[in-house]
Image (cartoon, rainbow, N blue to C red):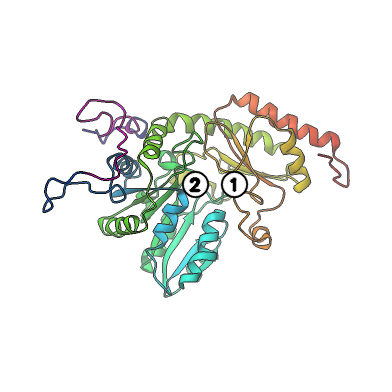
Amino acid sequence: MTDHSHTFQTKLLHNKHKADEETGAVSVPIHHASTFHQTDFDQPGRYDYSRSGNPTREALETTIANLESGFRGFAFASGMAAISTSFMLLSQRDHVLVSEDVYGGTYRMIHDVLIRFGIEHTFVDMTNLEEVATAIQPNTKVIYIETPSNPLLKITDIQAVVKLAKANECLTFVDNTFMTPALQRPLEFGADIVLHSATKFIAGHSDVVAGLAVVRNEQLAEKLSFLQNSFGSILSPHDSWLVLRGLKTLHCRLEQSSRSAFRLAHALAKEPIIEEVYYPGFSFHPGHSTHLYQAAGPGAVLSFRLPDENAVRFFTKHVQLPVYAVSLGAVESILSYPAKMSHASMPSEERKKRGITDGLLRISVGLENADDLLQDFQNALAAIKRYDTPTRGLQV
């Protein structure tokens, strides 16, 4: 049995799935079966078809529910599958309120897909509670939060928005990908559904695409279970096992990456060519005090703004250690260009309105030696300074 007094770090390793009940194996078995033998059609048993339920996937689902302090968890084929399935709790003519600088894939789902089914939306600055309250409509059914947001790391007061939602009979969804339950547990602040791209920090090794959702009560569990089975966008047994394996090292990975991110953020803030650094660990970061209240740390993701796209091109050609790629939250540092990667599906004018400029870069700090990473960034910035001109005529 799991001791509920254990810390989060210990719970990652010591839970009901620490050893297989039948064999004693200390790794969850991978059940690749697509279907299950039924001995009696009147009592078909716990499993019948893997879309509806699979022992390996169920191990992941119960584990993440426990870690997020939720009632039940669900594992999906991707983060967007988890988000999209959750949005299917909405009906025609319902309205959803969304953080304005939400992840580009979520923006696309809301702006280009849900609207075709008659589901309305409004993007708001979720850090402004007055704006949130004003934007709630009689048909608003969901308030969707990202905190910290992607890619500007804006902080939303989860508890305050939940109070507004409950007063207006709305559900609250929170994308917790950047923080993971290691640093932030939105359900404990009253949120109804917490969502993850488990591809990121939870799995942590750039080798699986997965999504997770955890709900706070039985009623929501029944509804989301029906939708998961109906849509069928479930996580495979092998990928479920990979995510479970990644979870075991989540605490130590995130702890080291966060320490390195802290050092990198402070070093970048001193560089004259960098116009701004977005990082919740700064005392002057908007929402810093709120983040301290609802999260156990600033995390391992930060963004910084260079003067323009040409400076970005030059920087990315000279930096050597980070992988220059889509995604985040892996053992290797990942440098991303939101304008052409995570938020490419968002129109240029919408990006600029949200402060996602052509000079913005996002870095997810990995497990490299922090000194090596700092030196690599300083070398790339020094290269820009050597070849910069008053007209920004950088030659890549």
Rendering quarter of residue 361: top right
Tell me if mark 2 has few (under 14), some (14-19) or many (20+) residues whose alpha carbon lies within 10 angstroms of its own: many
- In the foreground, 61 or 51: 51
The span shown in magenta is: 11-36
Look at mark 1 in the image and give the residue it sits on.
285
Is residue 272 visible from the viewing direction of this image?
A: no
Which secondary structure lies at badge 1?
A: loop
Contact between labelled residues 1 and 2, with CB atoms less than 8 Å apart: yes
Q: Who's the residue at 23% across and 44% down the image? A: 36
Q: Position of residue 341 (x, y in %)?
A: 62, 49
Q: Is residue 344 left or right of residue 37?
A: right
Residue extending furthest right?
390
Image quarter (top left, top right, bottom left or bottom right) of the C terminus: top right
Relative to residue 171, is residue 207 depicted above or below? Answer: above
- In the foreground, 73 or 180: 73
Q: Position of residue 183 (x, y in %)?
A: 44, 40
Q: Is residue 275 left or right of residue 344?
A: right
Relative to residue 261, is residue 224 depicted above or below? Answer: below
Q: Is residue 21 magenta?
A: yes
Of the residues under marks 2 and 1, which one precedes in the sequence? Answer: 1
Query: Please, what is the three-letter code of the amino acid marked with disc 2?
Result: His
Q: Position of residue 223 (x, y in %)?
A: 30, 60
Q: Is residue 200 left or right of residue 269?
A: left
Q: Is residue 56 magenta?
A: no
Look at mark 2 in the image and give the residue it sits on.
291
Tell me if mark 1 has few (under 14), some (14-19) or many (20+) residues whose alpha carbon lies within 10 angstroms of its own: some
Q: Position of residue 23 (x, y in %)?
A: 22, 26
Q: Is residue 364 left or right of residue 159?
A: right
- In the foreground, 308 or 203: 203
Question: Label for residue 89?
Answer: none
